[in-house]
Image (cartoon, grey):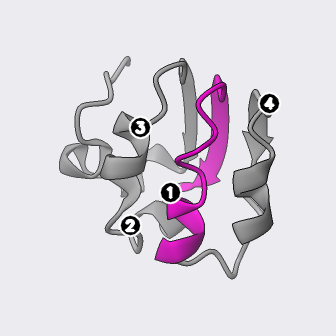
Amino acid sequence: MQAISSCTSVVDLNIRGCSGLSDAGIRALAPLTRLRRLQISAERVAQLPSFPTVLRQLPRLRCLNLQPASMVRRRQLGAFAVVQ
């Protein structure tokens, strides 16, 4: 995942199937300031303490696809707007 941080033009990213995603790996997404859509497994988010911080560093993120969403607590999303 560290290599992704140099791909700053990425706008759509699906890492739902990344079973080895670590907290350091999720922090590597912070430089992707053009990212508009992120798909990630809710099971992984529950294990990534840096996830809310990274969300706040993605100013263009408009779509966050978490499945199954029932596994995500509101506090894990931080300041990201929750739309139901």
**Distance between mark 4 and mark 1 Cα atoms:** 25 Å
Residue for badge 3:
57
Q: Amino acid at mark 3?
A: Gln
Which is nearer the N-term, disc 4 or disc 3? 4
The part of the chain drawn in magenta is: 23-41
Nearest to the observer: residue 76 or residue 6 = 6
Where disc 2 sits, the SS reads loop
Mark 2, other Cα within 10 Å: few <14 / some 14–19 / many ≥20: few
Identify the residue at horizontal 46%, vertical 23% (top origin).
Answer: 59
Residue for badge 1:
42
Above or below, 6 relative to 17: above
| Residue 40 belongs to the span the image colors magenta | yes
Dots 2 and 1: beta carbons under 8 Å? yes
Residue for badge 4:
9
Res. 31 image quadrant:
top right
Identify the residue at horizontal 18%, vertical 48% (top origin).
Answer: 75
Where disc 1 sits, the SS reads helix
**Distance between mark 3 and mark 2 Cα atoms:** 19 Å
Q: Amino acid at mark 1?
A: Ala
Whether residue 76 sits left or right of residue 84 in the image: it is: left
**Numbered mark located on residue 46 in the image:** 2
